[in-house]
Amino acid sequence: MKSHGQSWAEPEQTKMYYQYETLADEYHFQEFLKDVFNKKFSVGSFEEYRTRGQAQYGVDVYSARQQVAVQAKKKDIGRTKNALVRELLRELQETVAMLKDFPHPVEQVYFATNTKKYAEIQDEAIKLSRFHGKDIIFYSWEDLQKDISLNPDIRIKYYPHYNHQLFSRNIVAIGRFSLANLFGREKELDVINGLLNQHKLLLLQAVGGCGKSTLAKMYYEIKGRDYHHLLWLNGVRNFKKDIASNQALLTGLRCEFEANDSLDKIYELILSALFTVPGKLLIVIDDIIGDDEQNLGAELYRWASRENTHILITSRESLEIDAQLQLTNLSYEDCKSLFTANCKKDVSEAALKELFDLLSYNPMIIELVAKTINATDHLDVPTVIDNFKKDQLGAPQLQTAIQHNSNGRPVYGKLYDFINAAFDFTDHTEQEWYLLTLLSVLPAGRLPLPELLDIFFVVPEERPKIVEAVSSLAKKGFLVRETDDIRTHQLVLDVVRMKNTHYFLYSWIFTPLINRLNKANATFSNEGHRLSFYAGHILSRLKGEKSESILQPLFLLKNNLLLTYRYLGLTDMATGLALELEDELDAVKAFNFGDSNLYPKVLHNIGMHYVHQGDLDKGENYVSKAIAESAEGDLVGKVNFYNVLFMINVRRGTLEKAFESSHNALELLRPTPIEETGHLMAMIFNNYAVLSLKYNQPRKAWEEIFMGLDLYSQSKSPDRNEGFKATYLMNGAYALSGLGEHGEAVKLAEAGVEVREKLGLSNDPGLLDCLEMAIEICEIAGDPEKQKVFIAKRDAIK
């Protein structure tokens, strides 16, 4: 009998890579499998084998040429997992047994179903393969959906209603780009178009500030009208990791992933989905940085191998791409048009010529200087020229700082010099510098201003001042505002980080972000995707020796981000962060940060990560350390740590040790008032009930659940969690089922689901778990009407 404890039961993964409904008719399913396997093996030899009523020997589709047999098993997927697994196991064994009498040679057997990829069926198929000396493969609907996505002919025949609506035109979009104030790049558009038609993959390369991104946006806006689909990616540093972590891309390509999928697997899923996009596709990857270890050129050519695909890349670096266009600076006339469009003050031709010569005709610097002069009363062109000349451009200390802030990569020192000098002769308010400081550790692309205000500026009175700072910085040319979005050039952000010589200037950023992460972690909120996006960038920027002054907030951010990655299913990123935390444990233990509970909490979180990864030994090691390091008064922490040990031992099947863990926790709580710790005692009695159910003692389990619910009701602690109560009710329903009290079991299951629903959590795996349990309890009770209600709720969530 199935039993669950809130502390250890994990939701069954229900996401699929591509969302296609299963076929309704069984005979249609067989025809579908015939077509799928002919495409899969690139042959036409698969055919439906005989008809119902004739001896089929467990074979529905067969290819004599490939010596491959397919058994089709279409199921009612609204039934419970346990019922489906039991039936599929029996039918798989029967299929293999019948194949002994099949009159034709068979080397591979595909047991194809419209169900999820159940581990129990896959393990049985592997076991039977070894025993019979044949490849016996469990082919689930998840596998078949990938075949559908990779074969347009299959999609058109069986899913004609999906064919034109599967992807939106803008798979990942940028905001509308105004062409009103662009100068001197019209000829390059035709050059780019010709090179893309000839080569498919083109690198637009130049030093920073020359207008690469602007030209790419012009092409996207003007020439994009000739494409069926458009895809814009920005600021790619670690190619595969950034692509696999791009939530907008996953959404735009309608592909999802399982919680334990690696980033490499997610990347390949994205690439497979990209090849299913119909029609002519334009991909722009703006501001990419190469990495020899990533073999970036070869990966980009993989993308370009899709038919009807053009890929335009911008970079400050030279990459291993055959077709490259070196972008030069603007002419004098184009620079003059750019300057006068942004500065209305009088200026002589001679002064403009001297300024442009000094600025190397770089469009970004010219625009920044023009806006700064226009927005500052005491500035004019001659004054700015004098300031630049006096600023000792190219000073060694500045170059050292630039190299440090660019992670050792070659940079364009002269451009940094000009931006640094522009900062020096421009007055900035406190709010303007706060905003620039924040932006300097966030991505350089477009960022939504309302979201930044909501996350980082939590005091309502601060927000109007920040909005005013945005307007002022936009007038001076240090950022661009596009309605509710803002963007800042990477060169500007680099200089801000260089000027912030002490990283404690960033400390104010952490508290609001950590608080929001805590809230998202507690509610499984979709907001975790955006919060982790910001947190990951902040951690990547604030590294090195200068970060020692903010070690505590950095560590707290990492600790909370680890939990976020875990519930979002970003396994590789969680693993990388767990390894970082492991490396820093000695420092945390040494500094303590005035919180004696922090070190054991981090040990516990790292341990939980390894438990979720299936490494129970490593998880147990960290959780045991957490118990040993816990302060004497940290009662709640120790009880929760023992609860994790209970979970680990239940998974191992070492039930006596599981009981010992819960007993140790209960002994800690015995001297405490029930009003303060009754909710924790209830958790322990629920664990006892789980063990009793595993020992097939439903009467004892019900008594333990009843005791736990009573203790829970007596607790007055603000830490009471109704989610736990929901699980206690569900386990109580299992106990009543075991006693044959099916009507009462269904009522208790209804109550458990209702309690969980009232939490109102978005994306709640606990509610999905409760519904799965309720469906099974209704099946045991023989109550199909109530079961339909729970199935409908479950399917709506999925």
Image (cartoon, rainbow, N blue to C red):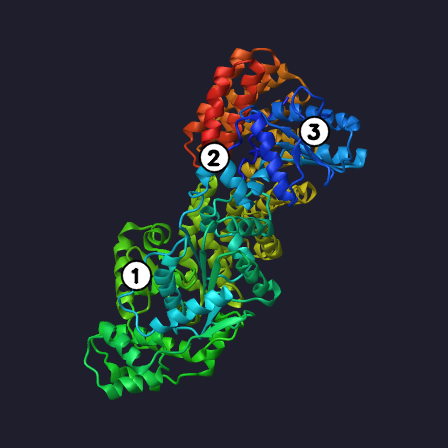
Q: Give the SS element for disc 1.
A: strand
Q: Position of residue 260 (x, y in %)?
A: 59, 43
Please tell me which of labels 3 and 1 falls first in the chain. 3
Categorize mark 1 by other alpha carbons within 10 Å: few (<14), some (14-19), many (20+).
some
**Residue plotted at (42% across, 75% down):** 327
Q: Position of residue 182 (x, y in %)?
A: 30, 70
Please tell me which of labels 2 and 1 falls first in the chain. 1
Which residue is disc 3 drawn over? 59
State which quarter of the image contains the N terminus. top right
In the figure, 502 relative to 460: above or below? below
- Out of 49 and 601, give the one closest to the viewer: 49
Which residue is disc 2 drawn over? 764
Answer with the quarter of the image where residue 590 lies: bottom right
**Residue plotted at (52% across, 27% down):** 24
Q: Position of residue 95 (x, y in %)?
A: 72, 27
Residue 311 visible in this rendered orientation of the protein: yes
In the figure, 184 relative to 17: above or below? below
Which residue is disc 1 drawn over? 481
